[in-house]
Structures are given as structure tokens and as C-alpha cells.
Amino acid sequence: MALGGPSLWQATAEPPAACPPLAGEREAAVAIVGAGFTGLATAITLAEDGIDVVVLEAEEPGAAASGRNGGQVIPGIRHFPDELEAAFGPAVGRRVYEFGLGTADAAFALIRRHAIACDAVQTGWLQPADKPAHLDASRRRVAQWQRMGHAARTLDREEMAAALGSEAYLGGWMHPGGGSVQPLSYVRGLARAALAAGAAVHGASPVTALERLGERWRLRTPRGSVVAGRVLLATNAGPGNLWPTLRRSLLPVWSFQIATAPLPAAERARVLPGGQPASDTREVLRYFRLDRDGRFVVGGKGRLGGPRGPDSFALQRRMVRRLYPALADLPVEHAWGGQVAIVPDRLPRVHELAPGLIAAIGCNGKGVALCSALGRPLAEALSGRPLADLPLPVAPVRPIPLHALRPLYVAAGSAWMKVKDAFV
Ligand SMILES: Cc1cc2nc3c(=O)[nH]c(=O)nc-3n(C[C@H](O)[C@H](O)[C@H](O)COP(=O)(O)OP(=O)(O)OC[C@H]3O[C@@H](n4cnc5c(N)ncnc54)[C@H](O)[C@@H]3O)c2cc1C
């Protein structure tokens, strides 16, 4: 197994755009920290609107979650409308829900508009369930999508088995608006589109300090600095010490994936024949798909401290055996991990950390679509539109009590999730 080698996405991605480090001092209307989907989708809109924007990225575009994820374009927000209304009140709850309805379409539209080569296919997205209680939730979800005019539909046991080429589930549902991308090619394409629109995108430029300078902010990097009127922290799981309360409001959780060798022709015709990616309803969820060359890619919970050797991927290998026994002996060509920034209530939100300084977090495992769709509203907020108009709630940062004990929370949380998977 190529542990320590490139991830599947690194091995098959389009080449990166040139993003030289920031050197020297400069000013900008807006500075964005982080070149993942959130930062770059926002930068594209700002630059297209003629606003002078600089993106500062610690490593290179897509170095973190955006270039390492499952590439599943998943429509919608995890929560039901009544849950969102209970959390945020009727008006904001409704707005969040309605925003979620369009996120997958927004991602595919962005890809088309900028002609981004990233193996994008809008084949639909499957959510299989292996617990009777989860089938009820699937039916509720489909009813809601249908009420909003979407062609989502439930799949019974036989239909799901045919769609997956696996007997492992009881049924579930499908949304035709989902699909998949090669995530690293996608984020690199966004960087190229941002540059073409006139944004400055600097790689190898970690922001090491964020200082108030009158009405503006100064962002320092090892070889330069930017003074900007407004700042977006699009740092997801890794805000580091730039804004300590933000860091303490998140639990970075590892998720690992493996990719097999390309499937033999007979298996390729049987496994996920419609080309849809799938993520199941388990608490310790399993997400899987084929890549453009017919490799089987499966992901799920990783060990606390990140990958440490081939044994770290034992769970993923068990997933292959459980879901597709016929693939169990295929060699694993790539194995890698990435960190998802989990907020305890799993709700996406925007924080106004200080005047002129905002952060967008909480896309959890739906960020391919959600972060892409956030580009336009975040750009408008950074151009002066009231934050109250954002389609996500603007909430105060709530540090998790005793955050230093986060490994314990994550361990206890995942033990609890396993219990729920076993019994609920
Ligand atoms: C393994 C895995 C699988 C996933 N699968 C899916 C999936 O199939 N579908 C889906 O929708 N979502 C999935 N997700 C979630 C999705 O990837 C994220 O929600 C999304 O990529 C978040 O994008 P972002 O731009 O907000 O953050 P990121 O992509 O994490 O980008 C943040 C950037 O900020 C930079 N940064 C941090 N600190 C600094 C600093 N001080 N200075 C400069 N730069 C800094 C980082 O280097 C990084 O590039 C998955 C996540 C993981 C980890």
C-alpha cells in the first residue's frame, strides 16, 4: 500500500496554478486566509465584482480538506427544516434550509462557468441505510425534497442493491442533483479561475499574525504583509492560533480513505453502475465511489492522531470486504487522510469575530457543495452587504468547554457513535 505516497487525488490531478509566496507589503480591499473551496469560491466572486482581493494560503491551494476529501457533491444541509428553525428561529432556519437546496447545483454551475477540468459528473448521489430507523428518516427527507420540487426518490432494498451493486443495505434514497468531482483538480481549477478573474493567490504564505490597524487589519506572513479593510478566515480545521477562540470552537477529526487498483471490467459493470457516489447513514459513516479510472474509493473514520502506517487503514479495508466482498483482494494503491472540522451541533455558520473580520465554518462533510455555494454570499458580505442577509446564521463563537481535552471528546464521541450504529 502506498502509504506516505501521494493520495489518489494528488496522483491524478490537473497541474497546480502558479501561486508564488507573498513577498513585500501590499494593501487590498479584502484578504482571505485559506485557499480551499471556501476561500477561493469567495475570491472568484470578489475579483469578478472588481474588488481587490488577496488570498493567503499556508501551503498550496487544496492542501487541506478541499484537496483530500471524497469528492462527493452532496446536495442539502444535514438537518431537517424543523431542526434548523428550532436552532435559529423560523426566518433564519428557513433561509438556511432553502440555501441548502441549491448548493450542489451551485458547485456544478461554478465548474461549468470556469470550464474546470475535474472529472465532474452530476449523476446523482445515493444515501443507503442499513437500519430500519434510518429508512424512516430517508422517507421524511425525500418527502421534503419533493415538496420543494426536487426529483429525490426513495429506493427499496432491491433498487438500492442494483444502484450500488451491493446487498449491504436495506434501501435508502437518491438525489439526482448530486454527483462527484476530482476534488484536488476542482480546487486547483478554482485557484486558476480566481487568478484569471484578477485575484492574487499566494501559496506558501502562512498568516502568522493578524493585527488590528485602526479600521483595517494587517496580516503578516514570513516574507510580507497585507493590510486589508475586510478579512475572511477560511481556514476550516486549521485556524491555528490566529484566532484562539475559533480554534477552540472546533473539533478536528481525521477521516481516512483508500483507493484500490482499477476494477476488472466485470466488476466495473456491477459496482455503482450509474456512477453515483454514496455516503451511508451510519454515525461512523462509510462513503464510497469510483474514480474516473474505475478505482474503488472508500472512506470513513480515521485514528485520532492521523495515519501512522498501513494498519491505520484497517477499517477502510474492512469496509471494502463488507460492502463488496468480490473486491477484497484488489490491491490498495493509495491511502490518505484529511481533517474535517466538526462543530458539535454540525451546523454551518458564519462568525463575526471583530469588525471587518469574519469566519465561515461548519461545512463538516458537505463542504464540496456547501463551500462552493457560499462564495457569492460571503463575497457580498465582504463587500459591505449586511451580515444579516447571509444565508447562514451569524452566530457568536462558542468555544467548547475544556477544549484541551478534545482527544477525549473525539474518542468518547466515536465510541458512542459505534454503540448507536450497533443498536439504533
Ligand atoms: C477526508 C475527508 C473527506 C471528505 N469528504 C467529503 C465529501 O465527499 N463531500 C463533501 O462535500 N465534503 C467532504 N469533506 C469536507 C470538505 O472537504 C470540507 O468541508 C471542505 O473542503 C472545507 O473547505 P474549506 O475551504 O472551508 O477548508 P480547507 O479546504 O480545509 O482549506 C483551509 C485552508 O486554510 C489554510 N490555512 C489554515 N491556516 C492558515 C494560515 N494561518 N495561513 C494561511 N492559510 C491557512 C489551509 O492550509 C487550507 O488550505 C471531507 C473532508 C475530509 C477531510
Image (spheres, rainbow, N blue to C red):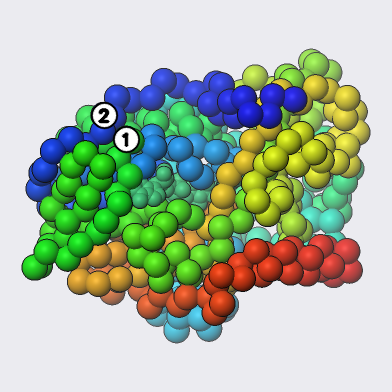
Q: CA distance from mark 1 to mark 2?
A: 6 Å
Residue 379 % position (x, y)? 25, 54
Q: Quadrant of residue 14?
A: top left
- Look at label 1 and name its amino acid: Gly
Question: In front: 167, or 404?
Answer: 404
- Could one spot residue 415 in this view of the protein? yes
Which residue, given by chain and number where applicable, does mark 2 sit on? 20
The reply to whether discs 1 and 2 touch (Cβ–Cβ < 8 Å) is: yes
Residue 365 % position (x, y)? 57, 53
Question: In front: 210, or 132?
Answer: 210
Which residue, given by chain and number where applicable, does mark 1 sit on? 203
Residue 374 % position (x, y)? 37, 55
Instruction: State the residue at coordinates (18%, 35%).
Output: 23
Q: Count of labels shown? A: 2
The 10 Å Cα crowd at callout 2, few under 14, some 14 to 19, many 20 or more, is few
Disc with the residue nearer the chain's start (1 vs 2): 2
Residue 345 % position (x, y)? 57, 72
Q: Quadrant of residue 355?
A: bottom left
- For the N terminus, the quadrant is top right
Instruction: State the residue at coordinates (56%, 53%).
Output: 340
- For the C terminus, the quadrant is bottom right
